[in-house]
C-alpha cells in the first residue's frame, strides 16, 4: 500500500466575497485506489483559516478506465491575498506478488469564478 500526496497551491484574490471554486480530479490505476482531498485557505501569515473536505472517490482497479471525481464549494471569507491549497491523497493498494505492478496517474483541474 502506498499513498501519493499532491499539493496544489494558487494565490487567493484581494477581495471580500464568496469565492465559488470547483475542481475535477481524473485518475487511473491498474490497482485499487482511494482518493480524498481537502481545500484550505491560508492567510498572508500562512495560518489556515478554514479546512474543507474536498474531492473523494475510488476506482475498481481497472487500468482501462479513467475515474473522474468532482466537487465544488464556496469559500466565504475576507480574502486579503494569501493562498488556496488543495491537497489530494491517493492510496493505492497493490498485491505483494508479483512485485512492481502498481501504476497510478492523476490530474487536477481547478476552475475559480470571481
Image (cartoon, rainbow, N blue to C red):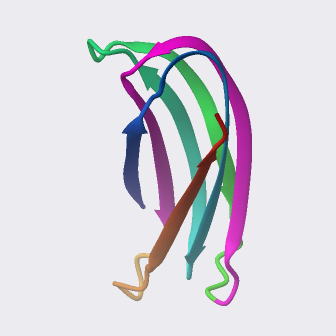
Residue 31 spot, x, y in % from top left: 56, 76
The residue under the point 68% across, 60% down is 58
| Image side of residue 90 versus residue 73, left or right | left
Q: Nearer the viewer, residue 92 or 83?
A: 83
Residue 95 spot, x, y in % from top left: 48, 76
Task: Check the picture and name the quadrant holding the N terminus.
Answer: bottom left
The residue under the point 35% across, 84% down is 99
Confirm whether residue 98 shows in the render.
yes
Instruction: Please tell me in which quadrant of the rendered image residue 83 appears.
Output: top left
* Magenta span includes 91: yes
* Magenta span includes 87: yes
Instruction: Please tell me in which quadrant of the rendered image residue 65 appears.
Output: bottom right
| Image side of residue 53 versus residue 9, left or right | right
Total marks shown come to 0
The residue under the point 64% across, 77% down is 61
Residue 64 spot, x, y in % from top left: 67, 90
Dominant secondary-structure state across the stretch colored magenta? strand
Confirm whether residue 59 shows in the render.
no
Q: Nearer the viewer, residue 54 or 111?
A: 111
The residue under the point 48% across, 40% down is 86
Instruction: Check the image and name the residue furthest to the left.
Output: 45
Q: Nearer the viewer, residue 21 or 25?
A: 21
Q: Please, is residue 93 above or below residue 98 in the view?
A: above
Task: Check the picture and name the quadrant holding the C terminus.
Answer: top right
Q: Which residues are magenta?
A: 64-93
Amino acid at each position: 500500500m502506498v499513498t501519493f500526496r499532491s499539493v496544489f497551491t494558487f494565490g487567493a484574490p484581494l477581495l471580500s466575497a464568496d469565492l465559488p471554486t470547483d475542481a475535477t480530479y481524473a485518475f487511473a490505476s491498474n490497482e485499487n485506489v482511494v482518493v480524498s482531498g481537502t481545500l484550505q485557505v491560508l492567510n498572508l501569515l500562512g495560518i489556515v483559516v478554514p479546512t474543507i473536505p474536498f474531492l473523494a472517490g475510488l476506482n475498481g482497479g481497472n487500468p482501462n478506465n479513467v475515474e473522474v471525481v468532482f466537487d465544488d464549494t464556496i469559500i466565504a471569507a475576507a480574502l486579503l491575498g494569501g493562498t488556496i491549497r488543495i491537497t489530494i491523497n491517493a492510496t493505492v493498494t497493490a498485491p505483494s506478488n508479483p512485485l512492481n505492478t502498481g501504476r497510478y496517474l492523476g490530474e487536477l483541474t481547478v476552475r475559480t469564478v470571481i
